Image: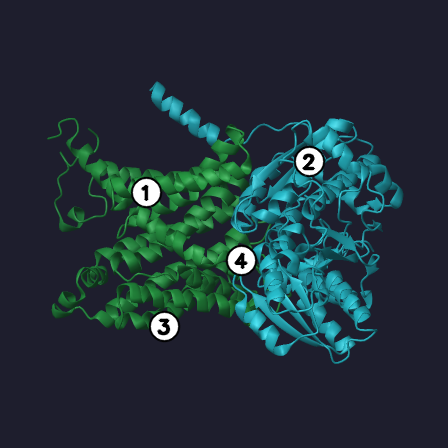
Amino acid sequence: MIYKKTILSAIAVIFLVSPVFADLVFPSLSYRTGPYGPNGIPFADGYADYFTLMNERDGGIGGEKVRMIECETGYNTEKGVECYESTKGEGALLYQPLSTGITYQLIPKASADNIPVLSSGYGRTSAKNGKIFKWIFNFPGTYWDAASIATKHAIEMSGGSLDGKKVALVYHNSGYGKEPIRTLEELSKKHKFELMLLPVDHPGQEQKSQWLQIRRERPDYIFMWGWGVMNSVAIQEAANIRFPMENFIGVWWSGSENDVIPAGDAAHGYKSLAMHAPGDNFPVYDDMRKYVIDKGLGAGDGSNVGTVLYSRGMYAAILAVEGAKSAQAIHGVSKITPSMMRDGLEALDITEEKLASIGLAGFAPTFKATCENHGGTGSAAVQQWDAKKGTWSFITDYMTSDQSVIQPLIDADSAQFAAENNIKERCN
Amino acid sequence: MLYREVGEYKTSYAEDSQTFPIKFDRYRYFFVLLVGILFVPFVINDYWAGAVFLPFLIYAIASLGLNILTGYCGQVSLGTGGFMAVGAYAAYKLMTAFPDLNIFFVVIISGFVTAAVGTMFGLPSLRIKGFYLAVATLAAQFFLVWLFNKVGWFYNYSASGQITAPARSLGDFLITGPDATPAAQYLFCFLFVFILAWIARNLTRGKIGRSWMAIRDMDIAAEIIGVNPLIAKLSAFAISSFYVGVAGALFFTVYLGAVEVTEAFNIQKSFIVLFMIIIGGLGSIFGSFAGAAFMVLMPVVLKNLLVTQLGWATDIAAHFEFIIIGGLIVFFLIVEPHGLAQLWNLLKQKLRLWPFPY
């Protein structure tokens, strides 16, 4: 009998979710395992460490401690759903899944549960239209902005026109990689360049045939929408066929140290877009080392601090923290709810002064979210890899995307979503 | 003590050949059904539905389907993921093309579409067997996933190639879409599982099931005693694909709501369902359920134990999950190569003799 009771209570304990605390809860749907783990780890570390820094240095956000619940998704949508369901009951304020597939899963679910989702630079591009997507945010930029900015940079490089040139898109054959195609097709019509589409199947280790095709067709520029091991393999393959690296431009998810270091010197000159500055020459990193890493509170071993993806994760956490602060200011309470968090994100105004006060002056472009615009200004810079020094550096200023091409596409796509799901426009 | 034939007098053939000849077994079955219908829907929440019950029920249908083909008819298939994708995409096209079509019929018709596709890919089974057939079905897996990813018509030319299930209801209850209640979704899947398991059980006890098993045990002998291999093999492919298609349709419409074919229906799915029937027990209805429960529940239980209770880091817990589940699979297969169903049968044999075993 006692034995039976023990077993029953053990089963109950295994399935029971811990009681709700009164903290500000930010779940982290991370992936430290699986094929995309090498990219997921620095991001998850950056995300976790910034919240730890808030707790250690500032005593939380507005006096409220932050509690981050980490849940491993392995970049798998089924596990992502499990993670979402198991964490949402704990008062989750915001989801940032770092996976376009999981974001697509969460858009309807989170909207129904009234929990905001922030997919910075990934996810569904048309979620920029806040009139339709009330709960979804994707500032500071979207894939379509990235496609437009990469094209802009290519135009600059070829002296003002891409007329008659050939551009190849090497993309991860998934929802993520397919996102920019529609925009690039419009842009190819507008700028009269020829677009070549080269899908690479998950996980991206096998790319021989794609690069054989590139060698045969000799495109003038290559854009890449890759993630995980696909990036480094592509850069290595480009080096193997002696493709001029300065004409090879990756999206912001194809521009981390992990992607270029395996190719060694051959990666010298490779370019990628960037939504924030590389390197660790910012005061916030000193605080990070002082309050978090040196005290042994870091999520990782500290070796990732200052890498591109670590900074990306930290930036995601900064946007969450600033959103929470603005929510606290709007509603005048420190214990905010998910819907207050949404109001805070919608009123989020990232200014130079705010970035400087965080210790990140000039780190990222400024933007202001509004009811209509959940996607920011859509600006990004181009960074280039210096294999000798082993650093990324900006070679352009922040450029804005061609809204005359993108806005009609966003309106069309979000209108289709609204029609499918019977959503009425807000903000009128 | 409770579980024995003693005192149960069967006076007709029907009574003697019923699925649960022992009274205790029969009552247990009704008890499980009653709990499933009258208790679970009232306590179920989003977490239990999304993490435990919906995947368990849906994978149970898929492994029932694969068990019919592999366990009963002996035709190894690695195309389960591809056939689930057929069910999912058929459901998507039906839902978007005929918005007024009832979701129940959407799922059924998706099953029939998959059955047609499955029969087509089953044709090579008439000429090739064993590993060679496995390779042919593997080709089906890769071809189908490639097709749904390549041809825009299947995903209505959406920008990302994702398909999203619109909200549909059965009577007053929403079944698909984010606003559907977990109880309604659970009961909808439970209904399908109940009907399909009942049909599967009775099919395998009847003429058609016996012809499958004859083909499985020795196809030449089966042909000599008058089993038509064409009909037996193709019917196994058709019925198995029907089950897998229904599972795929439910997986997409009810469980996930939005899928991407390369991610949700890749080769991994085929392997998971194959593992389910191997661990559960080939050629056993109970085994399909046991295998599905094992593969769905173990990761969730381990995650809750290691991360939530013991506070391990999520990545270490995730790696340990692989190790523990892999170890358990090896352990079970060494202890009982015929799967959990055989363990269950042994237990029942022991119970019949208890407390005086010989």
Q: Are marks 4 and 2 in contact (CB under 8 Å)?
A: no
- Whether residue B156 is visible here, answered yes or no, is no
Residue extending farthest top: A2
Instruction: Read off the chain for label 4.
Output: A
Image coords of residue A427 (percent x, y): 81, 53
State the hue of chain B.
Answer: green
Q: Secondary structure at mark 1?
A: helix
Q: Residue B330, labelled with which disc?
A: 1
Q: Which residue is mark 4?
A: A203
Instruction: Work out how far the residue at label 1 is from the one at label 4, CA to CA, in angstroms.
Output: 28 Å
Amino acid of disc 1? Val
Q: Are marks 3 and 4 in contact (CB under 8 Å)?
A: no
Q: Which residue is mark 3?
A: B120
- Whether residue B168 is visible here, answered yes or no, is yes
Q: Which residue is mark 2?
A: A49
Instruction: Work out how far the residue at label 2 is from the one at label 3, CA to CA, in angstroms.
Output: 54 Å
Instruction: Read off the chain for label 3.
Output: B
